[in-house]
Image (cartoon, rainbow, N blue to C red):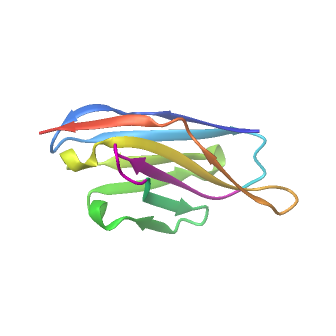
Amino acid sequence: QVQLVESGGGLVQAGGSLRLSCAASGSIFSVNAMGWYRQAPGKQRELVASITSGGSTNYVDSVKGRFTISRDNAKNTVFLQMNSLKPEDTAVYYCNLDHLTPLGRRQWYWGPGTQVTVSS
């Protein structure tokens, strides 16, 4: 079906930066939106940032002004530039694809997740 491949996670000190990448491949018909979610131990998975194929973006309040989401629609790739990282940003980050099938059905796909750890 559809596969998502993520890269860019790692360990960084507070105030540092990381850039996450996610490329979708497989039987892709139409992409409505792509986004990044994160989940810390013992907490709910939350939307960090999303971007539609038309370029509209959405961010959780805690990352506004620090994170920037972008995409390459032709390559079905989404990026998350994370600046001024804080220890509370530590989580597993998951790439999400909102896919529209040829029959008009919407399907969500998830990447395997990549660990982001911010030390103080």
Question: What x and y, as percent, mark residue 29?
Answer: 78, 51
Magenta part of the chain:
31-44
Does residue 37 show up magenta in the picture?
A: yes
Q: Is residue 1 left or right of residue 118?
A: right
Q: Residue furthest front?
A: 42
Q: Residue at x 44, y 53 (%)?
A: 45
Question: What x and y, as percent, mark residue 12?
Answer: 22, 34
Does residue 6 show up magenta in the picture?
A: no
Quadrant of the image for the N terminus? top right
Question: What x and y, as percent, mark residue 26?
Answer: 74, 37
Q: Is residue 83 visible?
A: no
Q: Is residue 38 visible?
A: yes
Q: Residue furthest right?
A: 103
Q: Is residue 55 left or right of residue 85?
A: right
In-front residue for pair 42/102: 42
In this rendering, the count of numbered labels is: 0
What secondary structure prevails in the magenta region? Answer: strand
Q: Measured along the vertical axis of the image, is residue 6 above or below residue 107?
A: above
Q: Residue at x 44, y 67 (%)?
A: 58
Q: Residue at x 31, y 48 (%)?
A: 82
Q: Measured along the vertical axis of the image, is residue 22 above or below residue 56?
A: above
Q: Residue at x 51, y 69 (%)?
A: 56
Question: What x and y, as percent, mark residue 66?
Answer: 26, 57
Q: Measured along the vertical axis of the image, is residue 104 above or below residue 25?
A: below
Q: Is residue 72 left or right of residue 57?
A: right
Quarter-of-image position of residue 27: top right
Q: Residue furthest left?
A: 120
Quadrant of the image for the C terminus? top left
